[in-house]
Amino acid sequence: SYSLIANPVTNDNGVQGAVIVLLDVTEKEENERLRREFTANVSHELKTPLTSISGYAEIMKDGLVKSADVPRFANNIYTEAQRLITLVEDILKLSKLDENAVELGRADTDLYAVAQEVACRLKIPAQQNSIVISVQGSSAFVTGVPYILDEMLYNLADNAVKYNRPGGRVVISTGTEGGHAYMQVSDTGIGIPAADRERVFERFYRVDKSRSKQIGGTGLGLSIVKHGAMFHHARVSLESEPNKGTTVRVTF
Ligand code: ADP
């Protein structure tokens, strides 16, 4: 859609005319729509754990919980509070990327070193689910913001562990192809149905709501990857086959 600004003018010789300016506001409107949708989603996502916390606390406050059940109730409150913390952290990360407000300096960063650090952090959660995580490839240097690159790769590898199967594998690889550095995560997990492949990068979009809730997560991980890639002028590609696995690559 367009907005029209028409401005009648008369020059020194008395010749009349008009200056017409056409502004393409499609993108602006789309951004506005996304912003409204995001606010609505955020409110909903924050309200759900808060309502649970408030409910559990109210029952405990009124002395309606048998003492044997107190640890379970306290644990539920703790879990919901942790969920809120993760959610708020993810929302803050996204809004920083959105506003291009990342003031941290860029630095020559070796993606291979980032991959090793991410694999190390995920070793224990992977082991707990009988999943083997490994790093392959070679050094690949990118001039970028190290903590965003780390966050992006962590989110991809964390998904590869979460949406995997016992006995499955996760391979993080980095390298250069055609002069471009890349980082990639492959898994042997549940895969993503074709109809959802574009949408998983949307904020709060989750393929299977009930299953995802059980697994844990905010639905913001892949949006952070997408926005991090945009920030670094990188491209994200996703290949997936249901019940076989998923590969996501970020090419710089
Ligand atoms: P979260 O993992 O917190 O739900 P993400 O934005 O990281 O949010 O992912 C969005 C959805 O995409 C997930 O809920 C899941 O359904 C799907 N998904 C992401 N990565 C994978 C993967 N490697 N294998 C299968 N499904 C995935």
Image (spheres, rainbow, N blue to C red):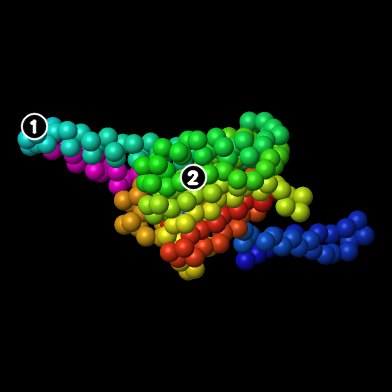
In this rendering, the count of numbered labels is 2
Q: Quadrant of residue 87?
A: top left
Percent of width and height locating residue 167: 40, 52
Percent of width and height locating residue 181: 70, 47
At numbered mark 1, what does the secondary structure look like: helix, strand or loop? helix
Ligand 1 is found in the corner quadrant, namely: bottom left
Nearest the eye: 204 or 12? 204
Residue 223 is at least partly visible in this image: no
Q: Is residue 205 above or below residue 106?
A: below
The range drawn in magenta is: 44-60
Task: Please name the residue that numbered disc 2 is placed on.
Answer: 133
Residue at x 88% of width, y 64% of height = 15
Residue at x 30% of width, y 47% of height = 48
Residue at x 14% of width, y 33% of height = 70
Task: Please name the residue that numbered disc 1 is placed on.
Answer: 67
Amino acid of disc 2: Ile
